[in-house]
Image: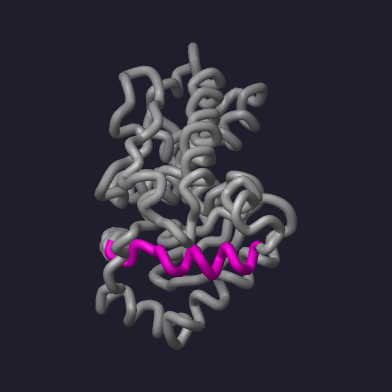
Amino acid sequence: MTPMTRRELLRTAGAATALLSLPEFSAGADEPPKGYALPKLPYAYDALEPHIDAKTMEIHYTRHHQAYVDNLNKALTGTEWAGKPVEEVLVNLDKLPEKIRTAVRNNGGGHFNHTLFWQMMSPKGGRPSVPFTDAVAGSFRDLTTMLTQLKEAGLGRFGSGWAWLVLKDGKLKVMSNPNQDNPIMDAAGQAVLGVDVWEHAYYLKYQNKRADYIDAFSQVINWEFVSQRYETLAKG
């Protein structure tokens, strides 16, 4: 048996950690054996009003996320990767057949990112935990500074993408990815908090005012989920 490279070991470990870090529901939790399914939204479409409007939530969830699920199933049907945890698929993109790799990257990333995103928002977000707050202070000075940097990353992302708070080697950092990419794809760390800056996430209410949308997002962050996710990842 050929020994695993260091990169392969890191990827395998990262996938295992990702699987352990979705405490409410995970991409794959409600899936049949050979396909992915749209996870249940943990609140009503209008629950995040007035910050995130109900119509945007409905379209974002039932059309955009559903399309990622459908296209991911289509791309993986008939392959050995069908039905595997989506995290495992994403950290092994280079092992997928080249003809489906881009489709899986885009749609698998969309499914994984949105499954996290719904949980990262809540009408009752609670407060950040002490361990999470301490970690933020160690990397950014305070929560306000971290959120400012997250906003700057979202505004600096040209076109469509995501801004992330990522845990890497025990430290928190802010980064952004294009399209539906996620930090786990390139072993850049594990997403603790993320904001979707595709226009479909905000255009109905905020038009081209991405800054206003990111400010609104900060009002509905599910700090309990984010804190729990950080603590789970930190232990991993």
Q: What percent of the width, then of the height, locates residue 222? A: 34, 62
Magenta-colored segment: predominant secondary structure: helix
Q: Quadrant of residue 112?
A: top left
x 59%, y 44%: residue: 180
Q: Residue furthest top?
A: 78
The residue lying toward the viewer, choosing from 73 and 209, is 209
Q: Which one is nearer the viewer's eye here, 126 or 106?
A: 126
In this view of the protein, which residue sits in the foreground, 80 or 74?
A: 74
59 on left or right of 32: right
Q: Which residue lies at the image location 55% right of the left edge and 35% below the top edge?
A: 64
> Residue at the location (33% across, 36% down)?
40
Q: Does the magenta run of residues contain 220?
A: yes
Quarter of the figure that contains the C terminus:
bottom left
In this orientation, does residue 92 appear? no
Q: Is residue 167 above or below residue 57?
A: below
Magenta stretch bounds: 210-224
